[in-house]
Amino acid sequence: MEHITPQELSTLILQNKINLVDVRKEHEVKQGIIEGAIHIPMSFVNEWLPAQNIDSHWVFYCHVGVRSGQVGLIAENLGFKNIYNLSGGVVAWCQSDFELIKL
């Protein structure tokens, strides 16, 4: 798993080369989500992840990067190779002057 900055994530989003997954809880996502992300709460990851494309590039994020780091480790244990964790999560994203959207 590679840890990436908000700036690196922004570049990957523009290149449309990743699957972006928000693993926060529902009440956290209601405050905003990174545009283009899908919401899969961490509690559902073990059921959801095995059905996903192991060869795709996946970026996981949460509030500060701890839960998404755990999800990245789960993905690695399932054989996923292209795993990224947003360092600092949405806190770092917003501090870097990137926006969240409301669903």
Image: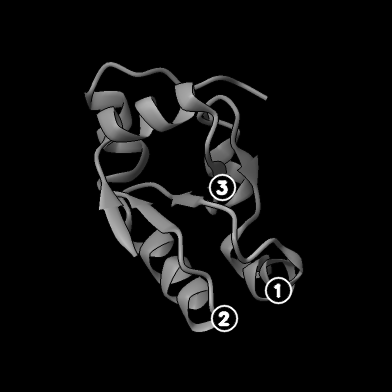
Please identify, in this view, whether the residue under mark 2 or under mark 3 is nearer the observer: 2
Q: CA distance from mark 1 to mark 3?
A: 14 Å
Q: In this figure, which residue is indicated by the disc labeled 3?
A: 21
> What is the quadrant of the N terminus in the image?
bottom left
Neighbourhood count class around disc 1 (C-alpha, 10 Å): few under 14, some 14–19, many 20 upward: some
> Judging from the image, what secondary structure is the residue with disc 2 in?
loop
Height in image: 99 above or below 87? Answer: above
Q: In this figure, which residue is indicated by the disc labeled 1?
A: 50
Verify CB contact (< 8 Å) between mark 2 and mark 1.
Answer: yes
The earlier-in-sequence mark between 2 and 3 is 3
> Judging from the image, what secondary structure is the residue with disc 3 in?
strand
Q: Position of residue 52 (x, y in %)?
A: 71, 62
> What is the quadrant of the C terminus in the image?
top right
Q: Residue at x 69, y 61 (%)?
A: 53
Q: In this figure, which residue is indicated by the disc labeled 2?
A: 78
Verify CB contact (< 8 Å) between mark 1 and mark 3.
Answer: no
Q: Position of residue 50 (x, y in %)?
A: 70, 74
